[in-house]
Image (tube, helix red, strand yellow):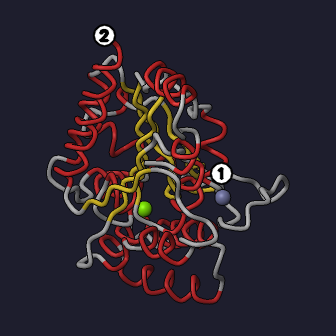
Amino acid sequence: MSTEEGAAAPGGPASAASAAENDATTPSKVVVVFDYDWSLVNENSDTYLFKTLAPEVYAWLKERARENPGDWTATVDASLLKMQDSGAAELGGIQTCLENIPVLDEMLDAVRETAASDAGALHIVSDANDFFIRVFLEKHGLATMVDSVHTNKSFTDDEGYLRVAPYVSAEDPHTCELCPKNLCKGLVIDKLGILTPDVRVLYVGDGGGDFCPGLRLRPQDWLLVRSDESYPSALGLSKRIKAHQDERPVLARVRPWTQGSEVAQLVREALALARRARV
Ligand SMILES: [Mg+2]
Ligand SMILES: [Zn+2]
């Protein structure tokens, strides 16, 4: 399963000792970490909002994003401001739109079943923003089931407009070369402190930004990689794993998915293994 465990299990008396050690450290907890866009929900919430409510602002956003690559959060913020200032949408309309963002069948069962289990915990790590995610979670009755949300900030400005700001401020930048300047999801994994021997982490993702946290995972963890050719915009993680497989291999067990039901089933499988490790 893993290079590390493989290396620790040559023949002789040592192998019995290491087997016993492995038994003692079979993960008895499951921590599910969900990416949001194209993972927990089946859309990019940033673009979905503008496409739905203000196509002219969406066209402007695309143009600005082309001119300012690597500055996505500022582009979304400027687009939000433009949309509200022009009267194309108000906060109530924005909220309703985001509450109704498409979701794959059974995907939310993965959240509900993790939360219902003594052995489970769940976090969201996303390049969307706090408002977009919170309104969705509240609408679907999931807000209290999620242990934490790590994403770009949202706030209401003096004009009463919804605005967003980067998770990582420009004054205190991170140094990860794999990630955009506003967010390194790998650092969030570090901060969560979940990489302990008693935990199996299931990271559910689709995009290039999920590669860095994917590299944090250990052989006992599972990286749930969206692998659906019919969603080319949700193959960034899959492509990045392949591109770096020699020099930066993922150590976790890679488990491809295309349907929400597959994610729910994998979560069920991990929870069952953890429960078995507890008795
Ligand atoms: Mg995503
Ligand atoms: Zn990173």
Q: Position of residue 246 (x, y in %)?
A: 58, 72
Mark 1 or mark 2, earlier in chain: 1
Left or right for 161, reference 52: right
Position in image of residue 73 (x %, y %): 60, 65
Relative to the observer, which residue lies in front, 46 or 95?
46
Q: Residue at x 56, y 32 (%)?
A: 194
- In the picture, the disc for residue 147 is none
Q: Secondary structure at mark 1?
A: loop
* Contact between labelled residues 2 and 1, with CB atoms less than 8 Å apart: no
Q: Which of the pair 173/25 is nearer the observer?
A: 25
Give the left or right position of residue 82, taking residue 118 as reference.
Answer: right
x and y, in percent, of residue 91 in the image? 41, 53
Query: Residue 192: x, y in percent?
Result: 60, 34
Up-down relation of residue 69 to residue 94 (above or below): below
Residue 167, disc: 1
Crowding near the residue tagged with mark 1, few <14, some 14–19, many ≥20 C-alpha atoms within 10 Å: many
Looking at the image, residue 142 lies above or below residue 154: above
Q: Quadrant of ligand 2?
A: bottom right
Residue, disc 2: 279
At x 57% / y 82%, what residue is drawn?
Answer: 65
Q: CA distance from mark 1 to mark 2?
A: 40 Å
What's the residue at 47%, 47% (across, down)? 131
Q: Secondary structure at mark 2?
A: loop
